[in-house]
Image (tube, rainbow, N blue to C red):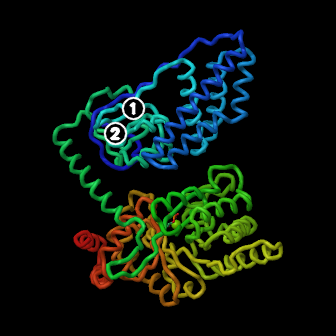
Amino acid sequence: MLKGIGASDGIGIGRVMLIVEQSLKYTPTTVTDVDAELKRYREAVDRFCENTMQQAESIRKSTGDKEAEILEGHIAIIRDPFMGGEIEKLIQAQQCAEAAVEQICQMFIDMFSATGDDLTMQRAADVRDIKDGVLSILLGVQEVKISDAPAGTVLVCKELTPSMTAGIRKENIVGIITETGSQTSHSAILARALEIPAVLSVSGAVTQLSSGEQVIVDGKAGSVITAPSPEEVETYTSKREAFLRERRELENYRGKKTLNADGTEFELFCNIGTPKDANKAVEADGEGVGLFRTEFLFMDRDRLPTEDEQFESYKQASLILKGKPLIIRTLDIGGDKDIPYLGLAKEENPFMGFRAIRYCLKNRDMFKSQIKAILRASAFGDIRIMFPLITAVEELRAGKALVEEAKADLKASDIAFDENIRVGVMTETAASGVIADLLAKEADFFSIGTNDLTGYTMAADRGNGDVSYLYSPFQPSVLRMIRSIITCGRAEGIPVGMCGEAAANPMMIPLLISFGLTEFSVSAPSVLKVRKNIAKWTKAEADAIAEKVMSMTTEAEITDYLRSVV
Ligand code: PEP
Ligand code: MG
């Protein structure tokens, strides 16, 4: 078995087609007729653009606009006057077109690769694709025709380039295996868009697999089963059928309201980490964003993002959501989330230490600039503010006071914002659970963070294997905490959501319906599954389950019972 990154869900069973890169070797020469060489280069670029346009058109028909735009981006890159100008300068200095294209493209590839930023590194893959395309034309090398692949083909290559993808006939390709790429690489995006199971970053795939051999691609587990036994083929064939059945069934829930079996409506939001993730929320049919983890804007850089930079990010997310709600959680650092340039002191017990709202309230300038950025963005959509790790009413009051100060500053500068912006509490500590009645009187909404709530209630670190048997949201203590938070919120008439992982757990859903939760916020791929699971239960059925569960004494009893009913 070969292991890699599961990048597109599903099971593919088929025979390998190895895509071995054609040699693009050449001997650099000094040209004497510069004008003729420039003409040869320009014609190659024209041909490249024509081919790419055709490929984009075909991918637009088979896959969609977004995927076609990746290819059209290649034309924009090669037509970029700076890049083209630099290549032509080298030709004018008597380098042959191949060497000029290679040198300048490589310069861009190195530059983009060095950033370490996932998205910018994608640009390096684009330029590599362009370089190979133009070189193939200049050298007259024939490209492999993926479009000729027979039915039941598993494509195996170093890297799946957008131009290769254009040749894919969805009905013939049952799996993709590559040696490079990550969850967010173009290969992954395209494979998901084509709904072809894919495993990326399988090291040595091209050398270890040979054309014609049978393999099974498990895009969920991120594994490739080589030389499968007849039993394995049978098992995976049933798994594949079950997967396809579920996918078809889930599609019935796309574009629908989130209703339980009685027709009561719930909100079904997504959790995101970057503004661009808002696209994933929309594509997944999320009805908004219930948790924007803003700490990602502060990580992977060497200084604080400015108010303007943050404003642009929050505004971008909000515009993508086109008026759907966006709950922005203020900076939640410390604990497991370090930001080196802030120079946080090492603590004996960081999870109980100087972090999240505690750190922000002591670093008021930084906190106020985040709040101002959120307020400014609130002029562009339905934005709400949420404070993490609240343990006392004073913290909520201090945070709200800062929101008022920030509003006054903006007003004085005549900057627009939503005057009625809602300010909520992330109930994720034992303390906030116990004083939920008090917090509910002063918060505009609650969102239950079960990831931390479970840890703080059980005094069990989520990352510590020795105590993981205690870390379960189905512990009677945690369930009582959840029920109490929802009851207290509802008593004060404020909406109560859940943005911890437990919100997507099918065993938790009937309990949440019974307790009175109004909003679920889950990862994008879970949206349709959660909608389907909510639709399963009437309130009366959910109440009967919850009543039974809340009378039980141990976590094992509860989970055994829930497993038997869901
Ligand atoms: C939580 O604690 O449940 C939560 C959603 O926040 P995070 O996982 O970012 O701590
Ligand atoms: Mg948390």
What's the residue at 59%, 11% (across, down)? 27
Q: Please, what secondary structure does the residue beneath circle 2 have?
A: strand
**Would residue 472 appear left or right of 186 to someone viewing this image?**
left
The quadrant of the rendering that contains the C terminus is bottom left
Residue placed under numbered mark 2 in the picture: 173
Report x, y in % for residue 139. Answer: 54, 18
Q: Amino acid at mark 1?
A: Ile
Residues at circles 2 and 1 in contact by the CB criterion of under 8 Å: yes
Report x, y in % for residue 387. Answer: 60, 72
Q: Amino acid at mark 2?
A: Ile
What's the residue at 71%, 52% (across, down)? 303
What's the residue at 34%, 39% (across, down)? 173
The tag earlier along the polypeptide, 2 or 1, is: 1
In the displayed structure, would residue 539 be above or below residue 529? below
The quadrant of the rendering that contains the N terminus is top left
Q: Please, what secondary structure does the residue beneath circle 1 have?
A: helix
**Would residue 412 appear left or right of 63 to someone viewing this image?**
right
Residue placed under numbered mark 1 in the picture: 146
